[in-house]
Amino acid sequence: MDFDAIRERIKRERRTLGYTQEYMATSLGISVNSYREIESGTTLLINPRLEEIARILGKPLESLIFDTGSALEYSQKLGEIEREFKERLEIMETSFKIKLTEKEGEINVLKANLETKESIIGVLRERLPEY
């Protein structure tokens, strides 16, 4: 989530509506300094506070998060995010499978080396019983 972009949309909407930071702070039940910290990025925006801000601005929450105006745009944006997430997940899964296969190959080589060494030790023990 791009919090900087969300804060900019909040400021833009607040100014468009002619609301002051003092008005927003009072509406949220917080100090003006606390509200300024929200807009400046000093305070992390958390979902309950963000929902309250969206309500005061008369905007759907998703319009602040995704900069969308309608439910259709919101759905499209969610679809894009979902596709991007699935693509990244597939890439990570493929990478993991490749690494797993490589590790399995390394394990098989080590097992073969161990069996060879055990065979050599067995032969040596038969020929040199004192060892």
Image (cartoon, helix red, strand yellow):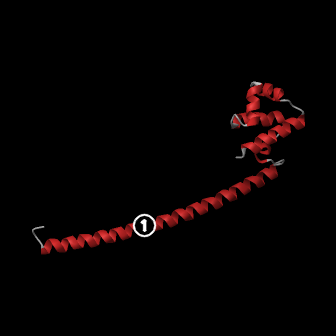
Quarter of the figure with residue 112: bottom left
Q: Residue at x 46, y 67 (%)?
A: 102
Quarter of the figure with residue 93: bottom right
**Image label count:** 1
User: In the displayed structure, does residue 72 sit left or right of residue 121?
Assistant: right
User: In the displayed structure, does residue 62 sit left or right of residue 106?
Assistant: right
72 is higher (above) or lower (below) than 118: above
Q: Position of residue 29 (x, y in %)?
A: 75, 25
Q: Position of residue 121 (x, y in %)?
A: 20, 70
Quarter of the figure with residue 6: top right
Q: Position of residue 4 (x, y in %)?
A: 74, 43
Q: Residue at x 81, y 42 (%)?
A: 9
Frontmost residue, 50 versus 15: 15
Q: Is residue 24 visible?
A: yes
Frontmost residue, 124 versus 67: 124
Q: Residue at x 17, y 73 (%)?
A: 124
Specify few, some or many for label 1: CA neighbours under 10 Å numbering under 14, 14-19, or 20 or more.
few
Q: Is residue 60 visible?
A: no
Q: Residue at x 75, y 26 (%)?
A: 33
Frontmost residue, 33 versus 80: 33
Q: Quadrant of the C terminus?
A: bottom left
Instruction: Tell me the amino acid under the disc marked 1.
Output: Glu
Q: Secondary structure at mark 1?
A: helix
Q: Position of residue 10 (x, y in %)?
A: 80, 38
* Residue under pointer 1: 104
- The residue furthest left is 130
